[in-house]
Amino acid sequence: LLAGIAVFAGVFVFAGVVRTPGASKNPHMVLASRALAVAGILLLARIALLAHEDGVPVLLVEARGPGDDFLAGALGLIEKRFEVVPPSDVTAFVADGRYVPRRAAAVVVYIRTGEDIGAVEDALGGRAGTGTAPVALLLAEAAVDALGAGSRLADLPGVVAYGLDVDVRGLDEGGAEKKLLALAGRLRAATGKGADYAMLWTADRLDLARVGKAAGIKAFFGGDGLNRNGDRATRLRVVDVTRLLASGGARGLRLGLFAGMYRGNYLAYPAWALLGMLAGGKR
């Protein structure tokens, strides 16, 4: 963007420069050239800063944050700023271009350890009614191991899907498939529900379609797209907003600005960066 502006600025300046001694330029041509240079700058800024990607953010929030009511407050703030949709709507939008609200976002709650299970139960247990926003739960291996038979997670309002966070470092496709299948079996035994999503660490070299087929995985978290129509529907990009929601000051505004930039409105970046600095650098 800066290089393009510099080129057009040069055109604007040199449009009025007479290169032959004693010659003169038509003032109307100079005016027209400079007008085109200004139009070029505006068009370039429009292309670079207002891309309108139409991506759907998938917001990841860790269950354990500062204060016992962190998760409940974070989910309440997200519900006020966005029209929360289940991850399945995002995959349908990416794959088939199906409609999602303009202010849509999906929410994934990350449960790292067994202690986080209690935080999730407290935060989601009090929610009820048809207006409950849908969320997906992403469980790390330690959290799955801590689940007991008949876990309360299965009865929490608003939980529409489960995911598994699996470390597959050093494993081939067969080993990764077996580990994912074993975790999915333990999750089903504890909650009666299967895993629809998974996040595999260091899995770039693996054939994810093969790894997830046996466990019935519909999509993997950790893609590099923007969850827009035309991206891979089996790879959803997640954005960790835990630090932002844990910081103080204008959290809702900063979250809204961030979502706007995610969808291609980069004009909001200066305001977002300034608010982030005022909040102690937690973005």
Image (cartoon, rainbow, N blue to C red):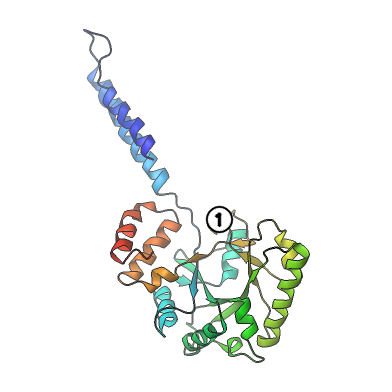
Q: What residue occupies the far bottom of the structure in this picture?
A: 150
Which quadrant would the C terminus be assigned to in this image?
bottom left
Q: Is residue 213 visible?
A: no
Image point (57%, 84%), residue name: 114
Please determine whether, in this image, residue 104 is positioned above or below residue 271: below
Q: Is residue 256 visible?
A: yes
Image point (49%, 56%), residue name: 54
Is the residue marked by circle 1 packed among few (<14), some (14-19), or many (20+) residues within 10 Å?
A: some
Image point (29%, 31%), residue name: 35
The residue carrying mark 1 is 225
Judge by depth and name the residue closer to the eye, 16 or 68.
Answer: 68
Q: Position of residue 157 (x, y in %)?
A: 53, 86
Secondary structure under the numbered disc 1 in the rendered image: loop
Judge by depth and name the residue closer to the eye, 211 or 233.
Answer: 211
Q: Position of residue 1 (x, y in %)?
A: 39, 40
Judge by depth and name the residue closer to the eye, 21 or 168.
Answer: 168
Q: What residue occupies the far top of the structure in this picture?
A: 22
- Callout 1, which amino acid? Gly
The answer to whether residue 46 is left or right of residue 114 is left
Please determine whether, in this image, residue 205 is positioned above or below residue 211: above
What is the count of numbered marks?
1
Say which quarter of the image contains residue 94: bottom right
The answer to whether residue 186 is left or right of residue 112 is right
Q: Position of residue 107 (x, y in %)?
A: 51, 72
Please determine whether, in this image, residue 88 is positioned above or below residue 204: below
The answer to whether residue 204 is left or right of residue 7 is right
Q: Position of residue 135 (x, y in %)?
A: 53, 77
